[in-house]
């Protein structure tokens, strides 16, 4: 895994946790830490989280290839692919 993928994943977790806190409790952790939602540091964090989301969305195919997964291919517990599991022997 490339370091930029790890950074993007960490930023997405931070963003997700912040949105979860906002949704459940109307509490903006980033704004609380950095002095309000219009503070320069808060805005930088929001921009970085948004950029990480765009990066992840734009590189979805590459990430799938590195992790050897596909959104269209579901693997049953037996480890066989769907087309192998449904074909007759």
Image (tube, grey):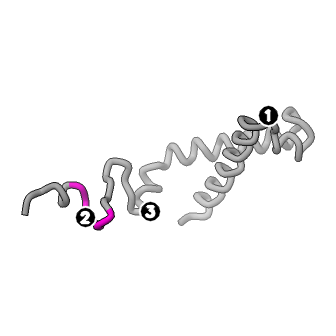
| Quarter of image, res 80 | bottom left
Q: Which of labels 1 and 3 is toward the front?
A: 1
2 relative to 22, above or below: below
| Quarter of image, res 86 | bottom left
**Residue at 23% in and 55% down:** 82
Label 1 Cα neighbours within 10 Å, binned few <14 / some 14-19 / many ≥20? few
Q: For residue 67, which numbered disc appears in the image?
A: 3
Q: Which of labels 3 and 2 is toward the front?
A: 2
Residue at the right extreme of this rendering = 35
User: Residue 3 versus residue 27: which sits nearer the camera?
Assistant: 27
Between disc 1 and disc 3, whose residue precedes?
Answer: 1
What is the secondary structure assignment of the residue under circle 1? loop
Please provide the residue range marked out in magenta: 77-82
**Residue at 37% in and 53% down:** 70
In contact (CB < 8 Å): disc 2 and disc 1? no
Residue at the left extreme of this rendering = 89
Name the residue carrying label 1. Answer: 26
In contact (CB < 8 Å): disc 1 and disc 3? no
Number of numbered tags placed on the structure image? 3
What is the secondary structure assignment of the residue under circle 3? helix
Quote the CA–CA distance across marks 2 and 1: 45 Å
Quote the CA–CA distance across marks 1 and 3: 35 Å
Q: For residue 80, which numbered disc appears in the image?
A: 2
Between disc 2 and disc 1, whose residue precedes?
Answer: 1
Residue 18 in percent (x, y) is at: 74, 43
Judge whether residue 32 is colored magenta.
no
Label 2 Cα neighbours within 10 Å, binned few <14 / some 14-19 / many ≥20? few
Look at the magenta stretch and give its main secondary structure: loop
**Residue at 47% in and 56% down:** 63
């Amino acid at each position: 895994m490339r370091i930029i993928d790890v950074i993007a994943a960490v930023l997405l977790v931070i963003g997700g946790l912040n949105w979860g806190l906002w949704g459940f409790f109307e509490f903006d952790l980033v704004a609380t830490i950095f002095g309000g939602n219009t503070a320069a540091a808060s805005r930088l964090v929001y921009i970085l989280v948004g950029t990480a989301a765009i990066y992840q969305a734009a590189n979805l195919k590459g990430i799938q290839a590195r992790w050897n997964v596909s959104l269209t291919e579901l693997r049953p517990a037996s480890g066989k692919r769907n087309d192998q599991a449904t074909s007759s022997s």
